[in-house]
Every structure is written in structure tokens, then in C-alpha cells.
Image (cartoon, helix red, strand yellow):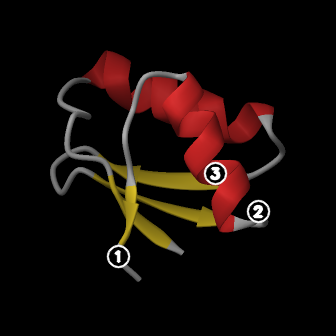
Amino acid sequence: MILSVPNMTCGHCKAAVESAITEVGGKAIVSLEDREVEVNGLPESTVLAALKAAGYEAEVIA
């Protein structure tokens, strides 16, 4: 699944998003330039909750 993470604006944000997804058992490919993250191996609800807990709102776009 691909998510839009509009408030991911810097290298620290990228690392925090990757960490939030990794901590719940997923794998993430993060594009800071596009403000998107591709996640494999987790249900949508788990990913969105992990990102929200880390301070990032996200929306599934694909």
C-alpha cells in the first residue's frame, strides 16, 4: 500500500516514519521528496495507528 504523509518534511521525519513502521513489524520504502511511503506486510489500520502515534497523519492513496 502507498500512503501520503504530507507533514513528512525532513530527514528526521523520514527516519521517524520508517521507525514507526518497522517497530510494528512492517517494511517501509519512504520517498521524502514525494512525501509518500510504501508499506508491505501490515494491515492498513496498523500502519495508520503507528504513524499517528508517531505524530504523522497519513492517507492511503494506492
Crowd tier of the residue under label 3, counting other residues whose Cα lies within 10 Å: few below 14, some 14–19, many 20 or above: many
Residue at image point 30% right, 48% down? 5
Amino acid beneath label 1: Ile
The secondary element bearing badge 2 is classed as loop
* C-alpha span from label 2 to label 1: 16 Å
Residue at image point 34% right, 76% down? 61
Question: Between 25 and 53, which is closer to the camera in this rendering?
Answer: 53
x and y percent of residue 56 in the render?
A: 39, 32
Specify the label residue 47 is tagged with: 3
x and y percent of residue 37 in the render?
A: 42, 56
The secondary element bearing badge 1 is classed as loop
* Callout 3–callout 2 Cβ contact below 8 Å: yes
Residue for badge 2: 42
* C-alpha span from label 3 to label 1: 13 Å
Residue for badge 1: 61
Q: Is residue 1 above or below residue 55?
A: below
Q: In this view, does 15 lie above or below 8?
A: above
> Mark 3 or 1 closer to N-term?
3
The secondary element bearing badge 3 is classed as helix
x and y percent of residue 43 in the render?
A: 74, 66
Crowd tier of the residue under label 2, counting other residues whose Cα lies within 10 Å: few below 14, some 14–19, many 20 or above: some
* Callout 2–callout 1 Cβ contact below 8 Å: no
Amino acid beneath label 2: Leu
User: Which quadrant holds the C terminus?
Assistant: bottom left
> Mark 3 or 2 closer to N-term?
2
In this image, 7 relative to 57: left or right? left
